[in-house]
Amino acid sequence: MKLFYRNKFRILLLIMLLFSVKVNSQNSFSFLEELKLVENKFDVKFSYVISTIENIQLQEKISDISTLNEILEYINSKTFLIATKIDGRFISIAPKQDNIKICGFLLDKDAKPINNATIIVSGKFYGAISNDSGAFTLENLKISDNLEFRYLGYKSIIKNVNELISPISDCIKLTMIEEEFELNEVFIKNYITNSLSKLNDGTIQLNTQNFNILSGQVEPDLLQTSQILPGVESPNESISNINVRNGVSDQNIIYWDNIKMYNPTHFFGLISAINPYLTKNISIIKNGTSAKYNDGVSSTILLETDNNPQKKLNGGIGANFISYDGFVKVPVSDKLELKTSFRKSNNNWFNTPTYKSYFNKTFQNSAVGTNASSSDFSFYDVNVSLLYNLNAGNHLKVNYIKINNDLNYFESEGSNLADEIKQNSDAIGVTYNSKINSKTTIEISGYHTKYSLLSNNYQNNQQQLAIQENEVLENSLKTNLNYTFNDYLILEAGYQLNETGVLSRTNVNNPLYNRVQRSVMLNHSAFTEINFTNNLWYARVGVRFNYFGKINQTTTEPRINVSYSLNKNLNFNARFETKSQYTSQVIDYLDDFLGVETRRWVMADAQIPLIKSEQFSLGSTFKKNSFLMDLSLFHKNITGILISGQGFQNQIQNKRLDGEQKSTGLEVLLNQRNKKAEFWLSYTLSTSYLLFTQIAENYFPSNNDIRHSSTLGFNFHYNERLNTSVSGIIKSGKPFTSINKEQETTQNGNFTVVNYDALNNDRLKAYSRVDFSINYLFLKKQTFQSNLKFGILNVLNKQQVLDTYYIVDQNDASKATEINIKSLAFTPNLSLRFTF
């Protein structure tokens, strides 16, 4: 499928890649480069070990000093090096000592101490933690070592040992600067665990660099982690079916470094396909979204890679019972960094218990079934990121990602004809950031993303071939201008152009049948918002204007996000947003795409309405010492939803009628922590109702109407090497439509169909699950370390029903057969990882 603007978009991407700006003046100077200038200036030759001095940065240009003796005196007094004249021309440079001791204090911009900051020796995985007064000490350092200072919500600092010399005392003072999203700063650190934070605007952010352990997980699966938050559910245990505040999964928009992802999963939705070791943060926004983001009427999920180039080569390799992977970060130069990763399923070697459990869960009740020996399934993903810092105020980032899932299934033994299903995603994006002056910054970004789902299905003793295809192509160009009036007030404005094409195709060879549906939408958007903050208030008020070309509709979407701190312990917030989206997923038939991935993307047109939402929430947060309580009340109304997009498997599943959804709920989070342990309890009370006036006059419970949901978790840190995590989930059963017990089937013309009762008149039994993980750092050296993690999903091996539907009994047309979708069984997993 070709899009009208596709070639023009590629030209724009090329222009952005070739765009350059003037070189920024330096604040520090390479000692190695300065020595070369001194050699030329005074006709001398320095003798040194290059690894000793290659990382040293000076605060002034020694090549500008007038005499050679003054230069040598500067080196001897201002560095941890000693310069000695060998003869009239040759000068040796060596460390003054092998074991250097450094001490200092970490302070914020108000000169207040920063405690619990992490100081590590880059690339060597050891370091120190600042104490309550911000003090730190490190010993046994080399002159070539770099120290990295990290603290959540603040910019990392990287200093060479030589730079950490105080001219007035033995211990240097370092000031850490808050991240540039100053008006969206961290409000709560250690939200549930030390890797989670809550920002002033209500965004929940996971920092993968601080990620340690989570029950059931052996790798930091970014989308699985989101389910520990109140209001975030997956009724069928799949991350491709995550529901935020009762919305269906296609109402969540996922961005990976400003690139929209239509399917960032493997194993047809069971695990995330985004590599966590190249991703710095994952942010989940449930309400009060910034006006610069479109779509996602239920939530916005942001996955972001690191914008700071590494000084040292680092990477890692690992394997678990599902896949093996590797990543590397290569500092090509001081300004250019290349990051890449790969992951590949390992079932081509052997089928582990984890793989078998995932396979049975994914392919149950599909044409594939649970016989792994008659199928060939594999997946892989590749990420490439290029970060180029033109100078201090201009940065360019290029990202590419490829996600592949491939299944071949042989219906009969010895057959050469295989059913197959392929699910792929390819995307490339470019982001350019420029600091025009001290008050103004601009960001220009663009991306091209493609999602495709293709199946070949042989039927009628392999005499008939049915081909089904669903494809989404999207191009986007976005500009964002940011102007800072003062420390309290920031204005943001921008424009976005999206071009989206959706293709659905069905082809049958015998008898000949071909159906092709193509739709292309141009979406023009303009947005503006004002951000205000001080010691008591945080406020963000904005509006987004949309024009949808294909359907000739406009929307005006106000966004309001306000919080007020009554004192240092108690905070209140109110958030309101209206949003819209023009793409959604539907299910035409339950056996589409082999019954594995039955959902296909469609676009708003004359028959399919634009989806619109309004959401309002009130909340309060109380925090004192190590205790946290977070409450939120919400009400959400969504219009333009399709019956076929709600996952019904009953008498209305094939209807293309539209209606509305109303959801109301209460979210509660309690968290208590100390130096050794973290305890949390999350609880959600909610109701969700649907109304389709063409088939019923009254509201009825939606498929996501899970009234009560609670998670209880406990993490314990025995020491720096050993950690454990255990959690339990219990929630109400989801609604389903039962059959009429007196007459299980009925005639509909020439067809016998199941005789269902009232819509969603019954509920499944309550769902519960216990998960466990343990993490052991068994190898810890200066240049590398190794972790062994073991996790179990469903420790108690409870076989539970996630959904129920009925089909006409093949042997007795007067009876209906009950079909149950079952939960994941007892699933152990083991991970071994080496990082350097």
Image: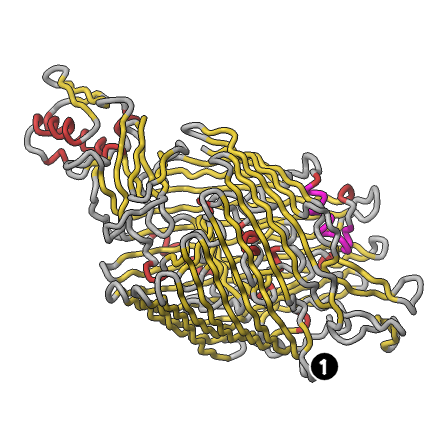
| The one of 96 and 611 positioned closer to us in this rendering | 96
Res 696 → quadrant = bottom right
Per the image, is 368 magenta?
yes
Rendered location of residue 677, percent (x, y):
50, 45
Residue 679 sits above or below residue 632 on the image: above
Q: Give the range drawn in magenta.
A: 354-369
Q: In this view, does 656 lie above or below 77?
A: below
Q: Is the magenta stretch mostly helix, strand or loop?
A: helix
Between 608 and 351, the one nearer to me in the picture: 351
**Residue 146 % position (x, y):** 31, 34
Query: Residue at 72% of width from left, 62% of height from top?
Result: 507
Residue pictured at 46% horizontal, 52% vertical: 196
Q: Going by the image, does 780 lie left or right of 479?
A: right
The quadrant the N terminus occupies is bottom right
- Which residue occupies 30% across, 27% down? 142
Tag 1: residue type?
Ile
Task: From the top left corner, tell me how far across and down residue 243 is, in percent.
Answer: 59, 63
The residue to which callout 1 is attached is 695
* Label 1 secondary element: loop
Residue 211 placement (x, y as % from top left): 48, 45
